[in-house]
Amino acid sequence: MKLPEIKTGSAAALELGAEEVRRYYDDNTRLFLSLGQGSEGTIRRAVWGPGVSSRQQAMRYVDSLIVERLRGLDSGNGLPLRVADLGCGVCASLCFIAQQLPVAGTGVTISSAQVELARQRIAGLGLSSQVRCVQGDFCNLPAGLGPIDLAFGIESFIHAPDGAAFFQQAARLIRPGGLLMVCDDLLAPAAARQHPDAERWVQRFRDGWKGFNVISEQDAHQLARQAGFEPVETLDLTPYLEIRRPRDYAMGALMRCLGWLPISGSYWSMLYGGHALQLALKRGWIQHLVVIWRRS
Ligand SMILES: C[S@@+](CC[C@H](N)C(=O)[O-])C[C@H]1O[C@@H](n2cnc3c(N)ncnc32)[C@H](O)[C@@H]1O
């Protein structure tokens, strides 16, 4: 008789973490798309960076940074640049990019519900020859996706059950000289997190947003180096987020009344984590960064 396979602790934890995130997005994607900050199909926050004058542009700000970087790359063979979105939601970023530049885009998401919505979006925009969406775990990517000239992850990195695996898989995917861009919420340097409440609020953010991988920029650089990347640039987008809106104060009041009750329901958990994140950003314990690395 064949004995059942025993997984190592970390492999099992990795699968459990990814499974938890898959359920979270399968259950809530439609809600996030209809109640989120924009109507462009993105599941992320608006960034009112330099030159932005409308909500639509704010929702596209990070995509525009990626387009800028792509313009500086050459596939080396005259073919369209190969781009991958690690944690692609419904492929709104890749569709936007493909409307600006000739690219071959692959989006990877853990959620089957998102794959279905992404495929409808891609077909609806007539982009099926340029963009595809596949279901997969960016910590254990399906074979045959690379080589890629530029891979990016917008507000997906914090969900990685294993930060080292995220970079190792990205290194497998990206060609030497290619770029990796991560836009997410990273811990501020330790000196900025000395306040006695800091760790409690950061933990609340992690719990609410399934943030298994909320790490500092310094730790991210270390994992990236170990996987074969060298740092290129870091942009701090924190000042451009919407942090002090009336709805944030209203949410703060609601959380003060109800927030310490045991959480039930993943949408409630998202609100709970989101409030903690707002506070941590405001107090400087977390930063919203774009970090760029080159595959050496
Ligand atoms: C906050 S949403 C951001 C979606 C998209 N980047 C955007 O900006 O609209 C996080 C995304 O990460 C994906 N994700 C989280 N963990 C993942 C994993 N282990 N493998 C692949 N995708 C993952 C989710 O399915 C979701 O699409």
Image (cartoon, rainbow, N blue to C red):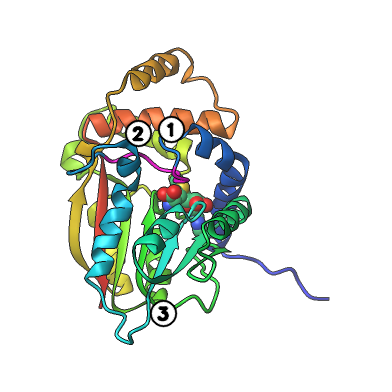
Figure check: 60 above or below 229: above
Q: Secondary structure at mark 2?
A: helix
Task: Say whether residue 258 is magenta.
Answer: no
Q: Amino acid at mark 2?
A: Leu
Cβ–Cβ below 8 Å for labels 2 and 1?
yes
Where is residue 28? Give x, y as percent. 58, 39
Q: Which residues are magenta?
A: 40-47
> Extreme right residue here?
1
Q: Nearer the viewer, residue 117 or 188?
A: 117
Instruction: From the image, tell me which residue sits under label 3.
Output: 147
* Residue located 35% across and 33% down the image: 277
* Label 1, label 3: how far apart the Cα atoms are: 36 Å
Figure check: 245 above or below 112: above
Instruction: From the image, tell me which residue sits under label 1.
Output: 273
* Label 3, label 2: how far apart the Cα atoms are: 35 Å
Residue 118 seen from this side: yes
* Label 2, label 1: how far apart the Cα atoms are: 6 Å
Q: Nearer the viewer, residue 262 or 243?
A: 243
| Dominant secondary-structure state across the stretch colored magenta | loop
Instruction: From the image, tell me which residue sits under label 2.
Output: 277
* Residue located 27% across and 34% down the image: 281
Q: Amino acid at mark 1?
A: Gly
CB at mark 3 closer than 8 A to ligand 1? Answer: no
Task: Say whether residue 45 is magenta.
Answer: yes
Left or right: 166 as drawn, with respect to 54? right
